[in-house]
Amino acid sequence: MKTKVSFTLIIIFALLVLTAAPFAGMIKVPLSVLKNIDLATTEAQVFYQIRLPRVFTAFLAGAALACCGVALQAMFRNPLATPFTLGISSGAAFGAAICVIFAAYLPIPYGNIWFSFAGALAAVLLVYGLTKIKKGFSADTMLLAGIAVNFFFSSLILFLQYISDFTQSFRIIHWLMGSIDVTGYRTPVTMLIFTVIGIAVIVIQRLNLNLMSISDEIAIARGVDVKNARKIIFFATSIMVAAVVAYCGPIGFVGLMAPHICRLLVGPDHKILTPASIIFGGAFLTLCDTIARTLIAPAEMPVGVITALLGGPFFVWLLLKDSGKSIP
Amino acid sequence: MSQKAKLVVLVLLIIAIAAFWAHRAKQQKQLDEEGVTIGGRDTGITKTYNRIISLAPSTTEMLFALGAGDKVIGVSEFCNYPEEAKAKPKMGGLMNPNYEVIVAAKPDVVIVFNEMLQPTDKFKSLNIETLVLEHSTVQNIFQSIQDIGECCGASEQAKKIFKELTSKMTAIQEKYGNEPHPKVLVIVGHDISQDSTKPPVNIKAAGDEFYNQMISYAGGQNVYAGTAPFPTINSESIISMNPEVIIDLVPADKNPIDTNVIIKQWKNLSQIEAVKKNRIYVFTEDYMTIPGPRVAMALEKLAVAIKPELTADANERPKGN
Amino acid sequence: MNDQKAIEIAELSFAISGKQILERICFAVFAGQRLFIVGPNGAGKTTLLRCVSRIITNYQGSIKVKDRNLRTYSQKSLAKILTYVPQSLGADIPFTVRQFVLMSRYPHLSPFSVISPEDEKIACDAMEMTQTVCFADRVMATLSGGERQQVSIAAALAQQAEIFLLDEPATYLDYKHQRDIHNLLAKINKTYGTTIVCVTHDLNSAVLSAEAIIAIKEGKIFFEGVPEKIMNEEILEEIYSKKFCFAEHPLTGQKIVVPDVIE
């Protein structure tokens, strides 16, 4: 019962954010733009060409990151497992940075995504390989390996920035900070394709996530091919992180926090937790991005600052509130 | 964490936010000589130095302009002007000097800026004298020329350059600085490698005191009125600020820059005045971003772009796009 | 009991970092049989169960489940036949008992189907049988060790597997819960004809409820036979490297071991 109420509240929150966000900003957009889509007017152009794409992009990025967080936290049975802590984000960012430097020589469509994907997969394989060397699969070893890989790729990005020229260097900083500055629908549509693939794969794995979150033994006993499931989850998270990082840079905290907040709200069952986190993550990042672009307008702030500032205290409040009653 | 500690953190946080929001009083945008002390400022300069290391393009230019190029024994990686500077030994970057090389070069003095706190402290601990300069306003630049002049025994030359610069700039201000003041947006960096079908992204505008002064002397008004020195802005904020002139500073680098692509990016923001009236200017000259002795040239370039109608010779008017 | 073999193990060996854990194990479990595996610590009992339940896959030799090589099963089809009950579930499982038991229906679901009323009923019956209905809506983390073990068996039951592999299901439990678990296993065996393979340290409960007993020492099968035969001074001394005292069970007359006198 509580679960259903909370899930409904999350959906209402998402709908509110999604309807309000495109109307927030420096230029006042009247409700009438919804009726007459006349792109000749500044208001309609701002609404349809600048704000809507940006809201979609933020929602997709948040949803994808939250989805990755849910899957990785269940698979590693570790509340700190996220695309960030496992080095997937920085791998993807490194791939994207490499693409900046060699873009001129490699005219591949969506080159940045493929490079990000290659980077993300390289990071995952490195983490996985490092763990395998130490016989058996230990979640702790894996997290440590992830943190090491994260630092490794972050320093490679800094190195690239150091050796590149001014204009390239300026662009590479983008992959260290993260921001959602898009116009037009090419970015959100591309992201939609990759995100939908990733989310679909994870949603199909939702039952396995439940079992894997208990223990590998139980998962195997209940018929989960754990090794295979791990590979599938790695693939899905890599492709989602690649799409997000290629267009928005590494955005922290959403992947960690959205699943935790949703777990406190709707409980641990991944049948509900997965969709709840995806919706909440998307809405949350949209809200943060709206704040980031309106708070000190006309200037905008890095969205990561807002995710941490807004999410952190809320997260702490939820934790404290819950620790009061449960767990005897 | 105890209750007290939580409270302290909270209070600190509030203070930090308040400080961030505190309105930074705008300085008077009047070009005058009063702000500049000619000689006698307490810079700690007691003697004439003969082995000087300059860690910024602007100060290197000043040294060469003062005829003290032969006293320069080291420059930063970014010092490419004048031509002779390129041949000088490189001493690392502005914010990350190579201390070993600097110590080995045995300088009398290293010229640094006031925001470089860490390097300044390090030089102190290495017993290397420093000349600490400011460069956040046009007056600071004049002062720096005076100070460097004293430092390398070229005070007379410094006075001469100062007189020249101020008279040139005052002339420009008198010619261009009057009403009307068109709204100007100066861009100091963006992701120019994007394709030309989208507006530029990841843009940093100029909002610091130096550019505010420059725009004002050149007769315009900075359309960004906020307090951030180099704010990141997006398409919507540009549309809402609606600049009449956009001046995009893209210093040429190792790779050639295709200004046409940058202009095409801007053209996507079709609803702003600057695009409608073909008032997009892309400047790749390095001196536009170096607050050194070529500041008068930079000011003239800005002024002519902002008010081309005041330039007598039609051929000298920059082509707006 | 029929003659069909539920599990057939031949020449099973397993080594980890050079140490031989299992060495050429051969035995068979008949369908519907209650087989107990005993042996000293580190003999390889748990490893044996983990090989059969496919948690360990890099073993040598062959394991057949229902006359089919274990390696040819998909994990899911294997889970419909065989399930593994670990020594203890983690103490921090955030799910409720009902959620946990329902998860046992996953091998019967496709990735796109949802839990049906029929699945709910099977889970309910399993909880009914294991007397866990009364705390069905409590969170697993709040249960006692004994209650958790009952839930663990309820879950195995809801999985509708024909073969249960249990690793010391009663080791950490008090007398009442020990009795409950062993009675429950016997009841499941009788009601559904489930094959029970149970690793235990408790010789007495093994001889009292097993149909067959296997003793493992240093990775090898040391004894295989009916429970009465293992209650032999020499055999037990060989297995455990200590002397045993025996007594007769006052109700059944079965020979049992008695605890040592503490000096």
Image (tube, coloured by chain):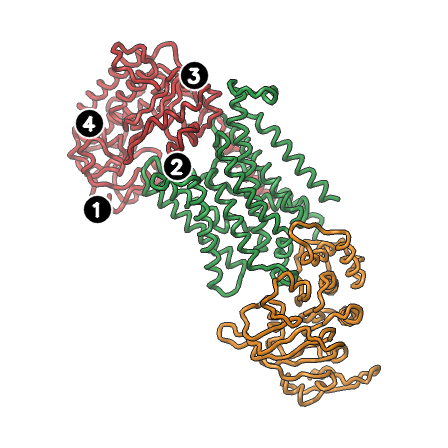
Q: Chain of mark 1?
A: B
Label 1 in the same subunit as label 2:
no
The chain assigned the colour green in the figure is A
Classify 10 Å Cα crowding around label 2: few (below 14), some (14-19), many (20 and above): many
Asked if both marks, 4 and 3, belong to the same chain, the answer given is yes
Q: Are marks 3 and 1 on the same chain?
A: yes
Give the alpha-carbon distance from disc 1 to disc 2, as whole Å: 35 Å
Q: Position of residue A238 (x, y in %)?
A: 50, 48
Chain drawn orange in the picture: C
**Which amino acid, by three-letter code, is at mark 2?**
Arg
Residue A171: image tag: 2
**In the image, what residue type sits under mark 4?**
Ala
Whichever of callouts 3 and 1 sits on the residue coming sooner in the sequence is: 1
Secondary structure at numbered mark 4: helix
Label 3: which residue? B273
**Display colour for chain B:** red
Can you say whether B282 is above or below A287 in the image? above
Contact (CB < 8 A) between labels 1 and 4? no
- On what subunit does the disc labeled 3 rest? B
Q: In this orientation, which residue lies closer to the viewer: A295 or A70?
A: A70
> Which residue lies under the disc numbered 4?
B65
Residue type at mark 3 is Glu
As drawn, the label of residue B104 is: 1
Residue C56 shows in this picture: yes
Which image quadrant for residue C122?
bottom right
